[in-house]
Image: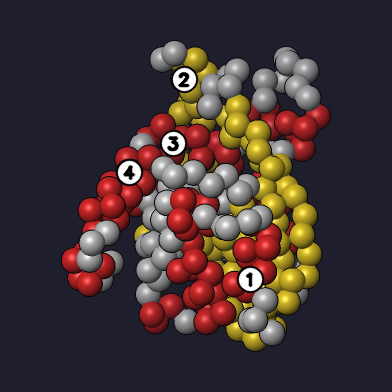
Amino acid sequence: MSLQLLLNSNAGKVLTWFKMMSEIYEDPKILDEYLLFHYGRENEILDPKVQWPDGMKQALDFAVRTPSHFSTNTMTRGLDLGCAVGRSAFEMARTCEKVIGLDFSHRFIAAANYLKNKSEVNYSRLDEGAMTVQLKAELPEGIDSSRVEFMQGDAMYLPENLGRFHRVHAANLLCRLKDPIMLLKRLGDLVEKGGELVLATPCTWLEDFTPRDNWPKADTLGWLKNYLLDDFELRSVSDEPFLIRETARKFQWTRSMITVWTRR
């Protein structure tokens, strides 16, 4: 964050946002939930003794399904913005020679790096009250982890020397940024000509994360088109559900809008 930004009239609001985001995404409970979300097996997320709705089962493996919207050709460089604990970055490494995964949370990046280096990481699943079960997240089969590099950073203030990429992936990130337009304006410089961009957003605009003035003025898809169509061709629009388990009986079931773009 620049000194200019710190000194302007909105500095207090910016610092409050950074503090709030750190409190959320550095929480060990949230880390455990995301490790389960990214790496949990079906029988670890959904009790096999319960007859769950089909929609809950279809919402599993979101972090695997979103990068599957890229083409299957092998590319040189990939970037996963808001990579959390790393599953999508690892999946991108199946068809990218080098992938950078970037996230705001130091704790998420530490867990992703530990998994990269040790091939597994232990975590706790909360069932109810203070009752927990110990589980293990494992590096997905067939992944060359040396292809992946994880770094802590802010998607609104990306390093100038980050370079360009043949694939950029950002899942459930835009509506968690204080000023998402800053990222949208940078995407044209991040993606190589002919490269691919996959954006996923549940369009859950909340003032806790994004000031109302920075929300889309109408629908999110139209807003994306307004900022991206000069540099990108929109290839497809679809939905992918996702499921986050909080306890044995409490889940977040949400649909994310997936837009796939090609750099002109």
Residue at 61% x, 49% y: name it.
203
Q: Position of residue 210 (x, y in %)?
A: 44, 51
Q: CA distance from mark 4 to mark 2?
A: 26 Å
Q: Earlier in the sequence, mark 2 or mark 3?
A: 3
Residue at (49, 44) in percent of width and height:
206
Mark 2 nearby-residue class (10 Å; few <14, some 14–19, many ≥20): few
Amino acid carrying label 2: it is Thr
Res. 150 in view: no
Residue that mark 2 sits on: 132
Q: CA distance from mark 2 to mark 1?
A: 46 Å
CA–CA distance in space, label 4 to label 1:
30 Å
Looking at the image, residue 152 lies above or below residue 107: below
Residue 246 lies, in percent from the top left, at 53, 27
Q: Earlier in the sequence, mark 4 or mark 2?
A: 4
Residue designated by label 1: 226
Q: Marks 1 and 3: CB-CB under 8 Å?
A: no
Between circles 2 and 1, the one closer to the viewer is 1
Q: Cβ–Cβ below 8 Å for labels 2 and 3?
A: no
User: In front: mark 4 or mark 1?
Assistant: 1
Q: Which residue is mark 3?
A: 30
